[in-house]
Amino acid sequence: MSDAGDIKGRRNQPPMTQSQSQSATGDTGFAKKAKLESLLSGYQRAADAFDELLAADNKVLPHYAMLMGELESFGPTELSRRTDACQRFVHEHGITYNVYGDPRGMERPWQLDPVPFVIAPEEWHALETGLIQRATLLNQILADCYGAQELIRSRWLSPALVFGQPDFLRPCHGIHVPGDTCLHFYAADLSRSPDGRWWVVSDRTQIPTGAGYALANRLVTSRILPEPFRDNHVHRLAGFFLAVKNSLARLSPRQAERARIVMLTPGPHNETYFEQAYLARYLGYMLVEGQDLTVRDNHVFLKTLSGLERVDVILRRVDDDFCDPLELRNDSILGVPGLVEAVRAGNVVMANALGSGLVQSPAFMSFLPGLCRHLLGEELKLPSVATWWCGQKAAREHVLKNLDRLVVKPAFRTHLNIADAERDELRKRIEFDPDLFVAQERVGHSTAPVWQKDTLTPQPVSLRAFLVADGKGGYCVMPGGLARVSPDSGGKFISMQTGGSSKDTWIPSATPVEELTLLHGSGQNVELRRTGNNLPSRLADNFFWLGRYSERADATSRLLRSALLRFNPERTGGALPLLSPLLQTLEMQGQLPGISKKPELWSNAEVFEAELLAAIFNPEREGGLRQTAAHLQRLAMLVRDRTSNDMWRVLSQIDDRLATPRPKQVMLAGDAVGILNQTLLGLAAFHGLARENMTRAQAWRFLDMGLRIERALYLGTLLDATLHSPDAENPSLLEAVLEVVDCSITFRSRYNLLPTVPAVFDLVLLDDKNPRSILFQIKQLVKHFDKLPKERGDTASPGKTILANSLARLERSDARELASASNNWRESELAATIRDTLSALPQLSDAIAASYFAHSAISRTGREGMR
Amino acid sequence: MKWEVLHRTRYNYATPVRDSFNDVRLQPMPIPEQTVESYLLKVIPAVRLTHSKDFYSNWIQHFEISEPHSHLLIEASSRVSTHWPAPLPDAPLCPFELMQGAPNIERCFDYLLDSRFIEQSPTAWKLALDATVGIEDAWQCALALMRFVNGFLKYESFSTHVHTHMTELLTDRRGVCQDFAHLMIGLCRALKIPARYVSGYLATEAASATHAWMEVFVPGHGWRGLDPTHNCQVGETYIKIGNGRDYGDVPPISGNYRGTRDRQMQVEVRITPVH
């Protein structure tokens, strides 16, 4: 039967021009049914859960019908192909999630299921109304707790519920917030019980995360399923983010057009750092850390290379109690001292307001129905999962009676660990300190189709919905949300930390939807700009070291490659000494520690080879190539929101290649040379991207300065070691030097003779046309220094003076003098010049750090105890 | 009685520090029991001061110094006249039933909970019960606890530091006035008597210094000061700066800066009676 259907289906369409969306709608019902059975043949709806796809009679629900029809027309093979494309997109966009305590560490790829979660429009409308009501209610409760406290005085809220919470921030009491809005962003976790009703499982009011992931999911899903996305008229997310932008701009104490809005992040180690960087980029805000901001005279400023720039609105992704080490947690290193005072003075606005974590406690849930009637004069539309706060006598009795059936949780954010507590112990603890506990009814999850192992299977889902205050007293709901899938069908909790997956959420519409974009329309006049936002000093620091480490990796690879290539086990003793300047250079930089003091190595080929390989692959070797690559990776992550995805990918590959775990197989010198070659190509790609794709702004300038300083250091060390070698004049040693600095071809085209010291040193030290000569590096640095922002006072900067001296010294050296110099290279003027340059470079690096990156740790003011 | 107080704190840093943000809580509280006639805060390097009231009605002066500096001087001088009420007798004044309503009295609630340096552990609860066996009255319990703490802890300078927690005192059994106050507050809270920490000055003939004591809430009589270090009720030689849940809420100077931790702190307090 299915054969017949297939044939019939094919006959209806010309085989070569068949487009997938046409086949979805143009196919006969006959064929559709047959294929649907094949996609859903393994789909067994659970008896004890609501199923999002199938009704009780196992028919596909109407709002899923169009999507399923199109998926079925793709067939399993095509769907699997698109699933692969989905994973590729996730990887290429670097969508990641950090998992704490994971041995694989940071940057776990985000899990996305290709089949979207569809919610019927009329059902969504009801959810929307309920969510808006809930956000409005929570906001009013917050405003009261941090203001008049009428609810406490009139016994609607128990003082224990408010004052007992660590999330009630006393210093924030009495702070006026614009428009009485504390809750600018709100998210709710929703789940559906077996009877099909939606319940709020938890409220997110501190830092509602996930909107960025929802956006990323949408980006990927709409690309891999373009036809169903179009045909279903899925509501766009851009409108929500436009509301976010408008809402934040309206908060600014200064004119909205001039407002500077920043996103405050705890840093790249935070679990949702990807999302922060992604959202900041999408919304057009600068992503800053606490140390990038400073308070002066109760105003908040961003520290940039060219001075302080005022900040008006802070979109915060740092927990509120970490925001100010002066008035809040004084052990915080993530915050900005004096921030609370600046907020109090009304010079900066935080979103969400400081202290908004208060109503996130599940204990509030049991008070919401009453408070809703009291404050809004209406019934609570969207129920919370049944919750009892043990601080109330009747509730406590109910909980103690039904302890087996209920889930007991800490009422407040604490370190209280009750996950493994026995029932009797739990009972005692509740009786001893009832305020600290809540109990909740268990909520089931509904199931939705997930594409797994070439078939659709039902798995538990929950939905996180997102709201933003519209600045006019109301809220705007993101049409969609982040659907999360539990990996096992019996899952009680759904969490990305424990390896769940996610889905895009679609709200289909009967008619085509309005297309919105966050980019300005063409009708607007745009002020043309040639400079971007000013670079925060912290990022300048990171770019500088990115440059230094990339060049360090390059130089190390070149030195090691030349050493390995020249290394011939058959010629022990004879050939080795000619490598010594190379090895000494590696030793100076830490790759081969103590090699010159271990002469026994020089005669033992095997040990020697092992030592060279360790410098490449050993992750414990300080300064080894492997560690340098890891540093590069780390720095690339720190500047990720300022560099292109291509740069990120290139650097990740370098690290991956060196880190590939190798089974016990013997590593041959030849294999290592191959890997070094690939590493050098990767670095060349990185430097090429930097040179060709970065605008000549401050970020690029600092990257290049780092690179120049590091290159000059390596060149200087190598030349110095060469002059000090007894074989300084040996052509094969000079040949090796030329190879390391990539000048062999140039040399041969200039001189038709064996390398000599004057000729080689002229090329590598003094030739300012050679991008690998020391003078070239110094001249580039001088150019960069002229373009750097002026320091305060505008006196000659120490860095500039150091550079001027080095330049003068090098330019004074005359190549002809080199030619006539004696054979005692070690004592020559040449050697002295190189040594002076070498000693100037670290000073230069320090001077740059002191002028532009200066940041030091926060210390606490000494405290006087009472006697 | 009228007093003049000079409180000078000097910090010397080994290398210049900058971005120093500080909150100063040295202004005596204007309350019926004392009249603050004048208060002046001097900070060198000279900066602009802003002031505000915190959640516990303490006055705070806030200042920031962004420029590099190697010395910081904070000098508070105030003139205060005190007129504390006469001590209450050791007699039944407040049956425990009256205390039932205490958590609902505004702002009392905070003073019944654990706080940063105070924890109502089962051990503390047992100590408090043992110390008040047979006493039915909350006020008399508080007095009994004061006598108990005064005997339980041994006063020993420098035996503890600013951040010593109350539970450490239960085993070490020695401390300074701040620790006496913390322990007594913990024991009172264990019996559900609202108790708060007070920072201030005590003028004695031997020495004038900063001092810490505590207050309990007695319905009908308000907050009453008790000094467990000296085992007495607060009188005219006590000058109150502020109150909070514990030391953490009312440190005289708190803040942070960027720069070296290598520093010295000198504190000088002079209290003189004015006639």
Image (tube, coloured by chain):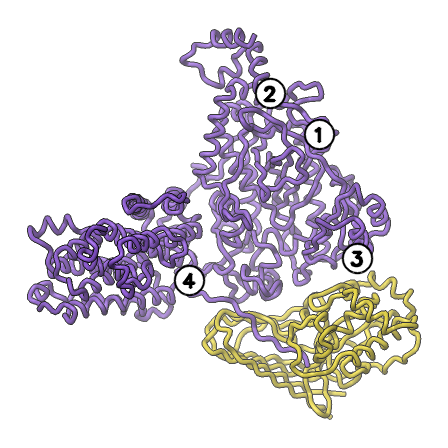
Chain colours: A purple, B yellow
> Mark 4 and 3 residues: CB-CB less than 8 Å, in contact?
no
Q: Are marks 1 and 3 on the same chain?
A: yes
Foreground disc of the pair 4, 1: 1
Residue A660, x across and y down, in percent: 40, 44
Residue behind mark 3:
A433
For residue A40, the mark is 2
- Other residues around mark 4 within 10 Å, as few (<14) / some (14–19) / many (≥20): some
Q: Quadrant of residue A865?
A: bottom right
Residue at screen point 40% across, 63% down: A853
Q: Are callouts 2 and 3 both on one chain?
A: yes
Residue A188, given in percent of the width and then of the height, sits at 66, 42
| SS of the residue under disc 2 | helix
**Does residue A218 sit above or below A600 in this rendering?**
above
Report x, y in % for residue A676: 30, 47
Q: What residue type is disc 4 on?
A: Gly
Residue A454 place in picture, x, y as percent: 53, 25
What distance separates the C-alpha of mark 1 from that of mark 2? 18 Å
Q: Please name the residue that numbered disc 1 is placed on.
A: A49
SS at mark 1 in the image: loop
Residue located 21% across and 53% down the image = A741
State how far apart marks 4 and 1 are (Cα). 59 Å
Q: Which residue is mark 4?
A: A307
Residues at discs 1 and 3 in contact (Cβ within 8 Å): no
**Circle 4: element type:** strand
